[in-house]
Image (cartoon, rainbow, N blue to C red):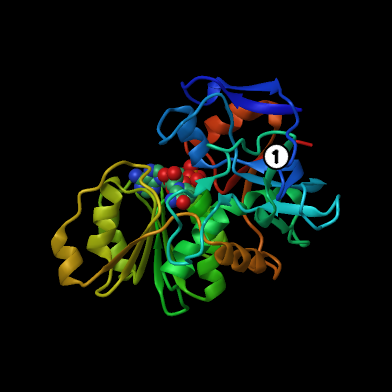
Amino acid sequence: MKAVRLHELGGPEKLVIEEVPKPAPAPGEILVRIKRAALNRRDVFITQGLYPGIELPKTLGSDACGEIAELGDGVRGPAVGTPVIIDPTIGWGPNRRVWQRDVTILGLPREGTFAQYVAVPAENVHAKPAALSDDEAAAIPLAGLTAYRAAFTRGKLTKDDLVLITGIGGGVQTFVLLFAKHAGARTIVTSSSDEKLERAKALGADAAINYKTDAEWHKQLRKVGEPTLVIDSAGGETLGRALDAAAYGARIVIYGGTAGNATVRPYSIFWKQLDIMGTSMGSPQDFEEMVALFGAGMRPVVDRVYPLEHIAEAAERVNVNAQFGKVVLAVA
Ligand SMILES: NC(=O)c1ccc[n+]([C@@H]2O[C@H](COP(=O)([O-])OP(=O)(O)OC[C@H]3O[C@@H](n4cnc5c(N)ncnc54)[C@H](OP(=O)(O)O)[C@@H]3O)[C@@H](O)[C@H]2O)c1
C-alpha cells in the first residue's frame, strides 16, 4: 500500500511516499481502508524532532475517515464496508479523570493514518457521523476530542461563560469556538491574522483581537470583558497575559505550548483564585459525546484538502500557521 513515511528528522519536506506492506489486523483489531486523513501540529512537531519518544521510520497521522476493510480474530462487526472514523487515543484506561501512563496516540509509536490502510484496536473504531462529508469526518477526531474535553469535561463551559480562545487559526481552537457557540457562550478570539479573525466572526465569535499587530492585545481584551474561561495552547507570553486578563474565579484550560514556556505572575493566580487545568486528548466517553454533536448538525471547519502525494506542502501549511481549521489529505 501507499504510505507517507518519515525516515529522518528535518521538517515536513522529509515526508516521503513509499510502498509498504499492507498491515494485517491482530486479534481484537480492525483494518480500516482510509479515504481521508487530517494533519495535526503533532505531525509537524515529529518531523522537526520536537516530540518525545520519536521512533523512525514511521507512518505519521492520527486522524482518519474510511471504511472497515477486515476484522481481526475475535471482533464481531461492524460489517466490512461500514463508514467509520478512528479515535486516536490508544489505551486511555479506566479512569475518565486522567489517562493511564502507558497511553499512546495513533501515528507514533503505532503506525498512523497517512496511508491506504491502518490497523487499530476495535474499540477505537466508531461510526462516521452520517451528516458529515468524508473530508469533514476526517477533520474531527484528534482536534475535536481535545477541544471537547478542554471545553466541557475540564472547562465546564456553559452559556454563562465569556470564553477567551487564543490563536483561533489552530485546528483545535476552531472546534472550541464551535462548541462554545453551541453552548450559547460569548467568545473572544485572538489571531495573528485579520483574515482569520474575520472568518472567526463569521462563525460567531463575539470579539476578535489581533495579537501580532497589537502588542497590548490583552488591554484591548479587557475592554471587551473579563474571560471566565480561557482555553490556550500557545503558552509563551500569551498565557501570562491571558491569566492577567481573566476574571476573578476564572478557569484556565491548557492543552499545548506552541509558543514555548510561559512566565506567569503568581499574583494573578492566587489573588483572583484562578483554577488552572491541564488536559490532553480525551477519554472514550469524551470521544462519543464529541461525535454526537456532529450527528446533530454541527460541521467542522476544513481549511484545505490536499492529495496524499502533496503531504509535504500540506504539512508546511500547518508549520507556518497559514491554515484556518483542519488540513485534510485525500488518500482514496
Ligand atoms: N495535549 C493534547 O492532547 C493536544 C492535542 C492537540 C494539540 N495539542 C497541542 O496544541 C497546540 C495546537 O495544536 P493544533 O493541532 O490545533 O495546531 P495548529 O492547527 O497548528 O494551530 C496552531 C495555532 O496556534 C496559534 N498560535 C501560535 N503561536 C501563538 C501565540 N504566540 N499566541 C497565540 N496563538 C498562537 C496560531 O493561531 P493564529 O494562526 O490564529 O495566529 C496557529 O494557527 C500544539 O502545540 C499541539 O501540539 C495538544
The answer to whether residue 307 is above or below residue 243 is above
Up-down relation of residue 112 to residue 312 (above or below): below
Residue 182 lies in quadrant: bottom right
81 and 301: which is toward the camera: 81
Label 1 crowd (10 A; few <14 / some 14-19 / many >=20): many
Residue 331: tell me if it is visible: yes
Q: Name the residue under label 1.
A: 118
Q: Horizontal and vertical percent for residue 208?
A: 42, 58
Q: Nearer the viewer, residue 111 or 264?
A: 111
Residue 71 is situated, as x and y percent measured from the top left of the image, at 79, 48
Decide if residue 200 is in sight here: no
| Residue displayed at 85% across by 55% down | 79
Residue 319 lies, with reference to residue 199, above or below; the image says above
Q: Quadrant of residue 330?
A: top right
Q: Which residue lies furthest to the bottom in this view?
A: 160
Image quadrant where one finds the C terminus: top right
Residue drawn at point x = 74 percent, y = 57 percent: 128
- Can you tell which quarter of the image residue 156 is in? bottom left
Label total for image: 1
In what element is the residue under mark 1? strand
- The percent position of residue 4, horizontal first and vertical second, equals 64, 27
Q: What residue sits 26% from the left and 63% below the top? A: 245
Name the spot of residue 45 as percent of width and height, x first: 45, 34
Of residues 322 and 248, the one drawn nearer to the viewer in this rendering: 248
